[in-house]
Image: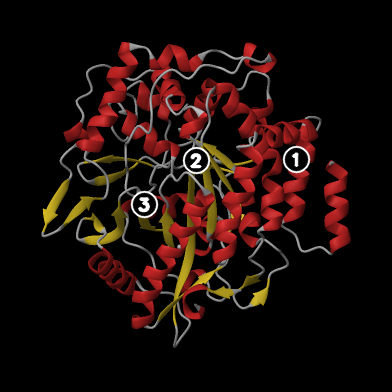
Amino acid sequence: MTLISRASPSCRVLTDVTRCTIRRSGVCGLAKNAEASRMKETCVSFSSSSRYSAKISQVLHLDNAGIGIRRGRRSIVAASPPTEDAVVVTEPLTKEDLVGYLASGCKPKEKWRIGTEHEKFGFEFGTLRPMKYEQIAELLNSIAERFDWEKVMEGDYIIGLKQGKQSISLEPGGQFELSGAPLETLHQTCAEVNSHLYQVKAVAEEMGIGFLGIGFQPKWGLKDIPVMPKGRYEIMRNYMPKVGSLGLDMMFRTCTVQVNLDFSSEADMIRKFRAGLALQPIATALFANSPFTEGKPNGYLSMRSHIWTDTDNNRAGMLPFVFDDSFGFEQYVDYALDVPMYFVYRKKKYIDCAGMSFRDFLAGKLPCLPGELPTLNDWENHLTTIFPEVRLKRYLEMRGADGGPWRRLCALPAFWVGLLYDEDSLQNVLDMTADWTTGERQMLRNKVKERVNSSGWKKAIQNVV
């Protein structure tokens, strides 16, 4: 375990403060190779369509809508844009529009960026107890004032900060998250992490607060964890016990570090998705950092990874269909449409739609909002509630690593950029893993989280390779 603050911070879509920015648009042609010839040229047809462009403009309009209220030199940002005020739906969304939304993420290699997100546990120096919301609010307000961040509000509660393309947000149990800006180099990523941790440390130490970089809360039980005043988390907290035994542990007691990477085409997305999924257990093993539960060894190297095996298997896991010959943007949309919803955001409130179908929403048949149709903002929100080991938005998220100390926060993007942004490395990964079966990939994921000796690790990996 490493004390981050006492000893010495996404081509992305913010999860809790909904940002509906289209990161890029335009035609993204498929790579000219044997694999690409079998793929549907989805990107071209959607980005050039005037009908789709009009729907994308809804999202662009949201990003520029007057949802901030200036107060002095800073602005107060609403927790989510009021979609019913900012967008007028002129025609229903179709599945084609949802596929096109993902395809709009294609961008040329020179515009690829690195986005890093990382979470950490705050605690009181004197008692070692988790930070209370009141302390978190004081911390956020002080960082905003001292370092010129905009405050993100949900009702009367401060729940995050925003500065340029960086955001600070709160996970359900008060885990403190930086969602970094899309940056060009690993050096910039490390500088961003360092700057964030410096700012947090400067304020937190004055309050008697420290931060711990680890993948699972090592000392305190669920009953000891404060609940953040965010509407979406109340909905999730009520729903989680219905679909798995460890969902509340995931919400309140885990921390991760995550890397977000770009793709140039549908074919490029597929190759990176497959390589990322195949090697995600390796990242889990390398960054495993959650061996304690309530003060005792828990039998796992990565308790966080174990928790995801029984959180909600409708929205988590290794996604075997990504390795099907037919996989592409459309197949991921079909998967996402079948993942049960959590909520819809309307009139500055989260409406509980847990377990309901986005397919019904497309048809105006959502039980919690009968007759109402979704916007692209609703689709973007829904995509943030899907939790596989690799997640597709308008970029790919590598989600298999435990949270950890400063150097590991910089190491994870280095690991994935080296593998996926270098063509030779990517092809070597694909060649090496081409004959791995669904069962072997799953076996590897199951084994790496367990506490085994070095020979056991070697044997588990050799069984696959």
Left or right, residue 465 beside residue 333: right
The answer to whether the residue labelled 3 contacts the one labelled 1, judged by CB atoms less than 8 Å apart, is: no
Viewer-nearest residue: 288 or 192 = 192
Report which quarter residue 195 is drawn in. Answer: bottom left
Q: Residue at x 48, y 60 (%)?
A: 119
Q: Give the quadrant of the C terminus.
A: top right
Q: Nearer the viewer, residue 247 or 433?
A: 433
Task: Give the mark nearer the N terminus: 3 vs 2.
Answer: 3
How far apart marks 3 and 2 lie (CA) works out to 22 Å
Asked if 16 appears above or below 287 in the picture, the reply is above
Residue that mark 1 sits on: 441
Q: Judge left or right: residue 324 versus residue 211.
A: right
For the residues labelled 3 and 1, the Cα–Cα distance comes to 34 Å
Is 352 placed left or right of 359 in the picture?
left
Secondary structure under badge 3?
A: strand
Q: Residue furthest bottom?
A: 126
Which amino acid, mark 2? Ile
Residue 377 % position (x, y): 32, 33
Q: According to the image, label 2 marks what residue?
A: 386
Q: Earlier in the sequence, mark 1 or mark 2?
A: 2
In the image: residue 376, left or right of residue 222: left
Q: Residues within 10 Å of mark 3 (few under 14, many from 20)?
A: many
Give the image location of residue 70, x and y in percent.
12, 53
Between disc 3 and disc 1, the foreground one is 3
Residue 430 in sight:
yes
Q: Which residue is mark 3?
A: 166
Label total for image = 3
Q: Residues within 10 Å of mark 2 (few under 14, many from 20)?
A: many
